[in-house]
Image: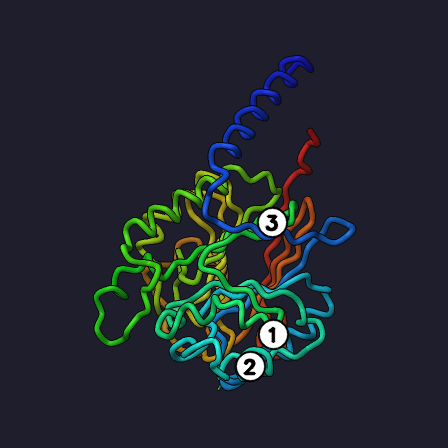
Amino acid sequence: MSGFSNMFMKSILFTISFGLCVLYASAELHKFAHSSKHDGSLNFLVLGDWGRRGAYNQSEIAFQMGKVGEKLDIDFVVSTGDNFYDNGLTSDQDTAFEESFTNVYTAKSLQKQWYSVLGNHDYRGDVEAQLSPFLKQIDNRWLCLRSFIVDSELVEIFFVDTTPFVEKYFTETKHKYDWQGIIPQKSYITNLLKDLELAIKESTAQWKIVVGHHAIRSVGHHGDTQELIKQLLPILQENDVDFYMNGHDHCLEHISDTESSIQFLTSGAGSKAWRGDIQETNQGGLHFFYDGQGFMSVKLTQTDATIEFYDVSGNVLHRLTSSKNLRSSM
Ligand SMILES: *[C@@H]1O[C@H](CO)[C@@H](O)[C@H](O)[C@H]1NC(C)=O
Ligand SMILES: [Zn+2]
């Protein structure tokens, strides 16, 4: 492209994206800025399905996270939900918050910001409790919203509240869910998807990551989440999302999308694991499945992503790397 038409295109693009910003300045998703390291890189840990007052190896995993967190000099921790078992928090005064979070993740390297989504178990308690700013006064690492964005310029991470997508929770009678702020479900989901799609389209970050509690693809106990395959996945495929990270299944997994370059990564092994079931019929794109406890680390630079899965002893069980070209500077 000649210099002139290149400039022309850029000014059109600028006008379009500027126009969008103005038009949709009222989008719902809250965006938090989190700067990268001085050299432009960013490292974080991903953990899911954990809060059991240290039991089921939760404390052992916390210990290994501390070691890996120090080695990688992590910038923050991501929680993929099911933060407090069995039924979320009863209120923002619930001592489970300290017993399962503050008193467990005590390593120095883990005294960083935590970004958390809600899982289905969290919806069985007082959901608003986990969103309450009061928790930040008890432990200032805590940040949990239903859906939000963390933007470091290098990477934009879109946190999505996936529990309201799952139809069976609205009809099952075995458990009570706190749907305050969700009903009517249809418009909640429509609005969320609209805000998300807009935000992903606007993103100029080198890496785009989406985090939710439920798996899009999983060969574990719960398997795929059909509602997310139908409603969420197309948005990720159309917008060059690199990774979808989730919990819910109490295992570690790496599955490649068969229709795009998205990698599905499950980190839901923060405490109780070893369910022992793997879905035989559902294994397209499967690279790695581990049914025991563990967690995941993510290292990002402008050109490379390295993701590693660890077990309860800190052994690296699986590693994936992904590279892309430097973005030409505008
Ligand atoms: C803790 O981890 C060890 C090693 O993976 C495993 O053998 C043991 O069963 C785990 N304990 C529980 C309660 O899951
Ligand atoms: Zn769950």
Residue depicted at x 58% and y 83% = 59
Q: Is mark 3 within 8 Å of ligand 2?
A: no
Pinpoint residue 147: horizontal percent, then vertical percent.
46, 55
- Which numbered disc, 3 or 2, marks the residue that appears first in the sequence? 2
Name the quadrant where ligand 2 sits: bottom left
- Which numbered disc, 1 or 2, marks the residue that appears first in the sequence? 2
Q: Residues within 10 Å of mark 3 (few under 14, many from 20)?
A: some
Q: Which residue is mark 2?
A: 98
**Disc number placed over residue 216 in the picture, else none:** none
Provide the secondary structure element on which disc 3 rests.
strand
Query: What is the quadrant of the N terminus in the image?
Result: top right
Provide the secondary structure element on which disc 1 rests.
loop
Asked which quadrant contains residue 280, the reply is bottom left
Q: Which residue is mark 3?
A: 151
Q: Are marks 1 and 2 in contact (CB under 8 Å)?
A: yes
Residue type, mark 1 in image: Asp
Residue type, mark 3 in image: Asp
Q: Is 99 on the left-hand or right-hand side of 257?
A: right
Q: Is 139 on the left-hand or right-hand side of 225?
A: right
Q: Nearer the viewer, residue 276 or 3?
A: 3
Q: Which residue is mark 1?
A: 139
Give the total number of marks visible in the rendering. 3
Residue depicted at x 53% and y 51% = 149
Residue depicted at x 39% and y 49% = 192
- Which numbered disc, 1 or 3, marks the residue that appears first in the sequence? 1
Residue type, mark 2 in image: Glu
